[in-house]
Amino acid sequence: MTKLWGGRFTKPTNKLVEEYTSSINFDQKLALQDIEGSMAHVEMLGACDIIQMNEVIQIKEGLLAIQEKVKNGDVTFSVEHEDIHMNIEKLLIDEIGPVGGKLHTGRSRNDQVATDMHLYLREKTKGLMELVEAVQSSLVEQAENHVETILPGYTHLQRAQPVSFGHHLMAYFWMFERDKDRLQDSLKRVNWSPLGAAALAGTPYPIDRQMTSDALGFDQPYPNSLDAVSDRDFILEFLSVSSIMITHISRLSEELILWGSQEFQFVELDDAFCTGSSIMPQKKNPDVPELLRGKTGRIYGHLMGLLTLLKGLPLAYNKDMQEDKEGMFDTVETLEGALSLLAPMLASMQVKGDQMKNAVNEDYSNATDIADYLAVKGMPFREAHEVIGKIVLYSIQQKKYLLDLTLEEYQDFSSLFEVDIFEKLNPNQVVAARNSEGGTGFDQVRKQIQLAKEHLS
């Protein structure tokens, strides 16, 4: 078959060139978006008297027939026709005859592909926001059940201060809330219409770009035709937001892996989200969070790949930009899979509160509260800090924890100690006392859970 663009050429395309330059193996994911954009475009061509209305009707009927075949999986795309746009156009001409060739009036593959990607990313961004909310709901549910479950809080992966487990989980809720906000905000840039910019300079046909923009649900057309076909910022922004989100997923996954280990035993993941060993029958491996953690690198790579691709490109369209799609598709699918697994994995996770409590009772993470205790009684905090350091050192040497010391032992370090010190050192009291806004105090955790529910509703 002669190429749809082949009039200027005297030789057929080398088969290796065809295979190497073809994008149909991956951009066929844009088939429905391509048809959607074409439907709006042909309606506009008719409304502007650029083609006749009977031709509009024929083309629309042909596009609808192809759309149905695509949805049913009854279409075979060909490398010979290069990309999704040429494949759809060839299918249309086969369906309704030469009049199908009029569909391409007043547009180029350059504005066509950009429009398809805007439509695709808008749909996928909204879907990802819903998946993020499902993860957030699982976090809120677990947090609400474990407001008064206490675990060691860490800095430098060293035990620092006891915190509510619900409070710890809610930290991830707010991370994902920011991810969701970034996705929402990115839609402002996604929702511009390139359609009608043509190859780079616009078109001499009296088209109505506002009409196609409105028909496709965009906020506005791009004001500049060169920018419309050259812009991939909206994909860069999506990949950047995705990189931040997968970082949050990876951090949470790392904690789930640690907490589920024999050394911690703070949580147990449901068997449905773990696998076994082919040689060690006792193993229960956290493969899902490990893979979630591992997928981070590929999304970072897609971001860096597109940044590198674009950094030296002159305006307007260049064939290099064919490489913008696979990373976008893979990032979408990677996040869809990750979020779809994370929500039920968190919801089904067993929390071992007793094990967490034992860990808190066998450390020195309540030491800061002794310093605060002495400071309230008038000792300068820095002096109190030194006193407590000596008490911790003494306890370690005696192989005791702070609640194991007697009042007399405390009073050897300061006469300010009284019997109420033991109440102050109780882990529940330590956590409950941190009632400042946003703190781990139980009342504060309940407040932020309520706030989170309001955000979700």
Image: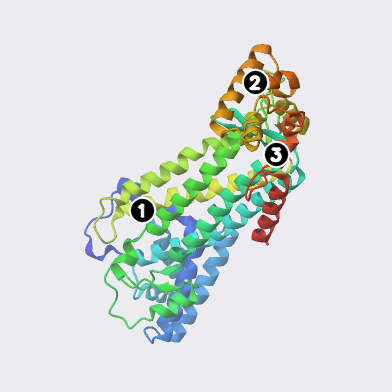
Tell me, for residue 52, which label it has, or none: none
Within-10-Å neighbours for mark 2: few <14, some 14–19, many 20+:
few
Q: Residue 373, percent across and down? A: 66, 34
> Residue flagged by tag 3: what amino acid is it?
Val
* Residue type, mark 1 in image: Gln
Mark 2 near mark 1, Cβ–Cβ under 8 Å?
no
Specify the color scheme. Answer: rainbow
Which of the two marks, 2 or 3, is nearer to us in this view? 2
Vertical order, 209 against 21 (above or below):
below
**Point 42% across, 84% down: residue:** 46
Eye-nearest disc, 2 or 1? 2
Q: Earlier in the sequence, mark 2 or mark 3?
A: 2
Residue under numbered circle 3: 431
Percent across and percent down for residue 108 are: 33, 68
| Quadrant of the snapshot with the N terminus | bottom left
Q: Type of residue at label 2?
A: Phe
Task: Kindly identify the residue that appears in the image at 38 percent across and 69 percent down.
Answer: 194
Disc 2 versus disc 1: distance between alpha carbons? Answer: 72 Å
Q: Could you tell me residue 32's position as x and y percent?
A: 51, 63
Answer above or below: position of 138 versus 358.
below
Residue position for label 1: 322
Residue 72 lies left or right of residue 443; in this view the side is left
Mark positioned earlier in the residue sequence (2 or 1): 1
Question: Can you tell which mark lies on residue 413?
Answer: 2
Single out the mark in the foreground, 1 or 3: 3
Q: Secondary structure at mark 1?
A: helix
Q: Residue at x 64, y 38 (%)?
A: 376
